[in-house]
Image (cartoon, grey):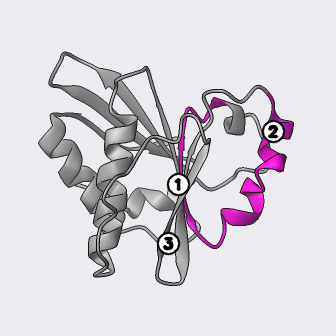
Amino acid sequence: MYQLLKKKLDLDQLNILANDIALNSNCGDLLLLKGELGAGKTSFCRFFINSMYEKYSLPKPKIIRSPSFPILINYKIKNFEIFHYDFYRLKNVNELRELNIFENIQKNITLIEWPEIILRYKNITNYYLLNFKIINLKLRQIEIFHNNKAKLQDVYR
């Protein structure tokens, strides 16, 4: 894994980071978000999804919920979708196949909270890993990695 970024951020700065990443995101991007409960994974996803709607001059969704119970919520953006998954309740890799996730990754943008189970799958070869750590009530440490050295040229604030 190659580190792209390590920062301590408040909620406003997390919004800026999510916006920067959204502006540089393309179909096929897979963002895996790790961290304890309340670390900011879902907040990042909300900011990211709203930024993608702004990027394509579309009206933002009224509510962006955590997909904890449905496991997947998708958002239509022009000619692709954002797939927002929460794998907290998944138990094994076979459940990933039932979700058809591998068919959706290449043609869409995919956000996955609690990605530990997909990281065990050997065919995932191009992804960003965002680690969230709680520093205090208002501050989080965010580390962003990519498994491909070529992505080190990507620049985020």
Image x and y of residue 123, in percent: 78, 50
Q: Nearer the viewer, mark 1 or mark 2?
A: 2
Mark 3 or 2, nearer chain start: 3
Mark 1 or 2, nearer chain start: 2
Image x and y of residue 5, in percent: 32, 43
Disc 2 target residue: 95
At horizontal 26% and vertical 61% (from top left) the residue drawn is: 20
Quarter the C terminus occupies: bottom left
Query: Which disc is residue 76 wearing?
Result: 3
Disc 1 target residue: 149
At horizontal 53% and vertical 84% (from top left) the residue drawn is: 79
Q: Residues within 10 Å of mark 3 (few under 14, many from 20)?
A: few
From the viewer's perspective, tell me whether residue 11 is left or right of residue 87. left
Answer whether labels 3 and 2 touch (C-beta < 8 Å): no
Task: Tell me the element at label 3.
Answer: strand
Query: Is residue 115 found inside the magenta-colored segment of the image?
Result: yes
Please report the bounds of the magenta region as a residue range: 92-116
Q: CA distance from mark 1 to mark 2?
A: 30 Å
